[in-house]
Image: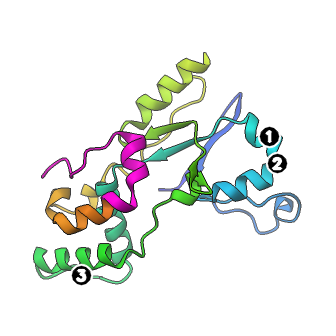
Amino acid sequence: ERTSAITSKYGIVGSRLKRQNRYDVRRFFGPRWAHHMPAKKVASALGTETWNAYRKISIIRDPFDRMVSFFHYGMQRTIQNGYDDFQQERDAFKAFILGERWRTDKPITHIDDKPVCDLFFRFESLAQDLKAFEESLGVEGEMGSIPHTKPSSARFKKRPTGSYFDPETISIVRRRMDWVFEAGGYPETPNDV
């Protein structure tokens, strides 16, 4: 998952999981930037003029696939040897969804419940979306490529995403992630149901 900073003549395009040097002077002067930083904090750190001048872009992911991936990511810390059978895993997944302690990422893309992003790239089509964006700016191919570090939650499991869901869990994900379904045009049920 860790990648080096991707740079172009326009500056840093992206970086993932790179630790900041604890002696880096930027920690002591100016805003401290972090991944998944709420939009309200970013806007405050940049100031109104800069915030309004910037084009704001976020990457979204199919909410059903994201929930299965997020579940497995969290469980890898607590379940060392997996589950005895899929029903046991599915029950744990349902408890995870019903608990509603998972984040929706809405604070990253919204301020006061209003969306602030000008554009969303879909995780599933990240390379194509980036290419289209470059073309719209007239800088095609100059930003470099972004590695696809999480191809899908299939790397965590051998089961289709839809097999984790029932009508109740579908409804909860639809309700809490409604803004992602709308922004990304995602289907109302997992694709493989």
Residue at left offset 62%, top offset 57%: 112
Residue 129 on image: x %, y %: 45, 31
Magenta span of residues: 174-193
Residue 58 on image: x %, y %: 54, 44
Q: Secondary structure at mark 1?
A: helix
Mark 2 touches mark 1? (CB < 8 Å) = yes
Would you say 125 lies left or right of 103 here? left
Label 3 environment density (alpha carbons within 10 Å; few <14, some 14–19, many ≥20): few
Q: Secondary structure at mark 2?
A: loop
Q: Secondary structure at mark 3?
A: loop
- Asked if the stretch drawn in magenta spans residue 189, the answer is yes
Label 1 to label 3: alpha-carbon separation: 49 Å
Q: Which mark is residue 50?
A: 1
Label 2 to label 3: alpha-carbon separation: 48 Å
Q: Which mark is residue 47?
A: 2
Residue at left offset 15%, top offset 49%: 192
As shown in the figure, which amino acid type bears the numbered disc 3?
Answer: Asn
Badge 2 or badge 3: first in the primary sequence:
2
Would you say 164 lies left or right of 73 here? left
* Front-lying residue, 80 or 133: 133
Label 2 to label 1: alpha-carbon separation: 6 Å
**Eyeballing the image, is 116 above or below 63?**
above
Whether residue 165 can be seen here: no
User: Mark 3 highlights which residue?
Assistant: 81
